[in-house]
Amino acid sequence: MARYELVKRSVALITLTNPPVNASSSAVRHAIAKSMKCALSDPEVTAVVICGENGSFCGGADIREFAGPLKGPPLVPLLDAIEAGEKPVVAAIEGVALGGGFELALVCHYRIAHSKARLGFPEVTLGILPAAGGTQRLLRLIGIPAAAISLKLGIVDQVTEQNACEVAVEFALRAVAKPLLSRRVSMLTTRCPPDLDALLDAVTMQVKKKAPGVMAPLACIQAVRAAATMPYYKGIKREGELMATLFNSGQAWALQYCFFAQRTAGKWTLIRSAAVIGLGTMGRGIAVCLARVGISVIAVESEKKLLETGRQMVIGMLERDAKRRGVSASLNLFKFTLSLHDLKDVDLVIEVVFEDMALKKRVFQELSKVCRPATLLCTNTSGLDVDALAGVTDRPHLVVGMHFFSPAHVMKLLEVVCGPRSSSETIATAMSLGKRMGKVSVAVGNCPGFVRNRMLKPYIDQATFLLEEGATPEQIDKALEDFGFAMGVFRMSDLAGLDVGWRVRKESGLNGSDVDPESPPRRRQGRRYCLIPDMVCEQGRFGQKTGGGWYMYDKRGGTNAKPDPLIQNLLETYRSKYGIQPRNISNQEIVERCLFALANEGFGILEDGMAARPEDIDVIYLFGYGFPRHRGGPMFYASMVGLERVLKRLEHYHQAHPDVPHLKPSPLLKTLVACGIPPVQKWREHIKTMHSHL
Ligand SMILES: CC(C)(COP(=O)(O)OP(=O)(O)OC[C@H]1O[C@@H](n2cnc3c(N)ncnc32)[C@H](O)[C@@H]1OP(=O)(O)O)[C@@H](O)C(=O)NCCC(=O)NCCSC(=O)/C=C/CCCCCCCCCCCCC(=O)O
């Protein structure tokens, strides 16, 4: 876990060896303690260099170990001892020095970093804080104003383009004769601005606004205050107290769960050329994603004018994107054409035409004729049957869904939709292409709406039923935003556009001329149906883009949502038309009905084998709908509330609303409760039907 060797006759070189990122597991800490003891007691050794194997200094504490009892040498005394040692210790930093890895570098007396090294404290993203002296030492090294402006200032002693380890050894030899006292960061005094309180109060306000309800950043601010106002020995005690609170919080568990879920879900490069058919908003975004990672793209449109508009938009996006990333725009990777025949040699095609099955089938039939037999055919449909498309081709095993989310060049989520005939290689290729494009790719089954949109329906339905019963869009949004969503369901729908759902409802016979005239009021297809969303659309209110939806906006495309008296009026008229007596609805009921219905559908999806694990569903909601990360995702949230309680509340709500099938607890939820409520990671063991590919 750490290699010890003597180099240049007098420098002890300690190399951390814990792939892939040299995380400081208990074994690594043990090996560091042993190696330091050797180095400090060997009279031949005059200086020490610590580095990491395979181009990575240290990715921090081994997060996997946080789930069990803490073992091995505790980090704080180990680091204090390195700093207090009487021989100069130099950190040779390549790759990452994160969290506990950065804290290790901070106790070294000197730091040599490669120009591409990344140093930092990502602990807040795991719900904790840098608790091995990190908050106390970094502030002492760079002072509070610097910390507020840039974490990079004055942290390292030398930046190099060479091998950091070799440079550090030479540096260590020169450092031998120099006094160490001033190099011990914990002995320094934190440089503070005169208006410390005001600064920290302002930062606290900002944090509360940006991440409402999230504990770790606020604890960090308290640790900063301690570094500014207390001696090191007291500051480190305060840091430890704050850590103890965070470490045992549900938020830390949720965020650490998210870290691993994101990586588990992405486990799955061969594509050099691709084609995108359809240059609407979605197609343009996808084309940019492909070119960004060096894939040559043939972009196809059906008419000259559309092709020219698409071409200009794509070029503009590429240029802006390249400017932002400080690289040159990869315009040479693009070819624009009106002919599908130009696709004969590409490795993969992504179809992004209108959501119309007949049109998509025609495109797939044509692709079968023109593309070489090994070309993968992908569809970006947001809910149509991928297998029905595969069925019109000569290669159903090479057909797969690649469901991007708008705007495709920004949104991280990609649902890879596995049809029953998609081959494992096809799915693996789509998954790895997603990863290459920087997406969080999740394999899902082929069911209407796939995972994200299928779950969204019961969530939105509950919100509209609550409107009927007496709530307002503002009240519902506020309750969900207090829960942690950046936007409540109505603000989010206004942003996404209300017309899409309206069209889908029309196509599925829920609204418009296909509705059975015999249907009782507020019921469709045998279940409760809220007419309000259709009434809003009938007034031409499609959300932000039309300047009005559930809210009013100051202009078309405006983002400042204000309550609209017109909606208030519409709700009152609707309730009185249908004889609904409005009632006071608590925030608890809003959150429970929306989120438990969401999770309940998730249980249904698991049961149908349309997602492989609850982690996959959670990742889809974290990256595809902005589910508050500190809540872990809908399934993890249900587990934190307690499955028994979720079951009871769903039973209660279903009893009150028997005409809403989405509130009827899913059999899987009942099974999990009956078999002793296993942790999320074990739910998979209780699922009977698994999709063959998931
Ligand atoms: C940037 C990365 C390092 C690399 O990114 P990339 O190249 O894209 O690769 P990934 O796919 O992300 O990762 C590759 C694999 O490596 C695994 N990995 C990465 N980092 C870690 C890690 N730190 N631990 C374990 N495993 C890790 C990853 O899962 C992948 O595995 P696989 O291939 O999927 O199997 C990027 O990975 C990254 O950003 N990593 C995280 C970096 C990070 O957040 N570091 C900080 C960790 S926390 C920390 O360091 C804390 C330090 C202080 C500890 C103090 C301890 C005190 C405990 C006190 C307890 C309190 C008291 C309790 C009181 C009581 O209960 O009584």
Image: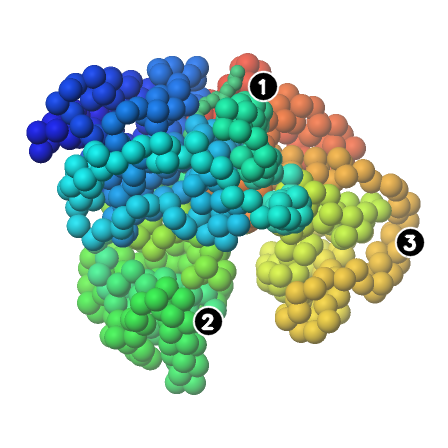
Residue under numbered circle 1: 673
Please tell me which residue lies in front, 65 or 150: 150
Q: Secondary structure at mark 3?
A: helix
Q: Quadrant of the C terminus?
A: top left
Q: Tell me the tag on residue 576.
A: 3
Furthest residue in direction left, as rendered: 9
Q: Is the shortest distance between ligand 1 and the CB of mark 3 under 8 Å?
A: no
Residue 529 appears at what percent x and percent y? 73, 49
Residue at 45 percent of width and 45 percent of height: 142
Residues tagged 3 and 2 counted as in contact (Cβ below 8 A): no
Q: Could you say which quadrant of the image residue 32 lies in?
A: top left
Tell me how far mark 1 sits from mark 3, CA to CA: 41 Å
Nearer the viewer's eye, disc 1 or disc 3?
Answer: 1
Residue at 57 percent of width and 30 percent of height: 230
Q: Could you say which quadrant of the image residue 444 lies in?
A: top left
Horizontal arrangement in the rendering, residue 580 relative to residue 590 (left or right): right
Which amino acid is tagged 1? Val
Mark 3 is surrounded, within 10 Å at the Cα level, by few (under 14), some (14 to 19) or many (20 or more) other residues, namely: few
Q: Tell me the tag on residue 628.
A: none
Q: Secondary structure at mark 1?
A: helix
Indicate which disc, 1 or 2, sits on the residue closer to the N terminus: 2
Q: Secondary structure at mark 2?
A: loop
Ligand 1, seen in the image, is in the quarter at top left
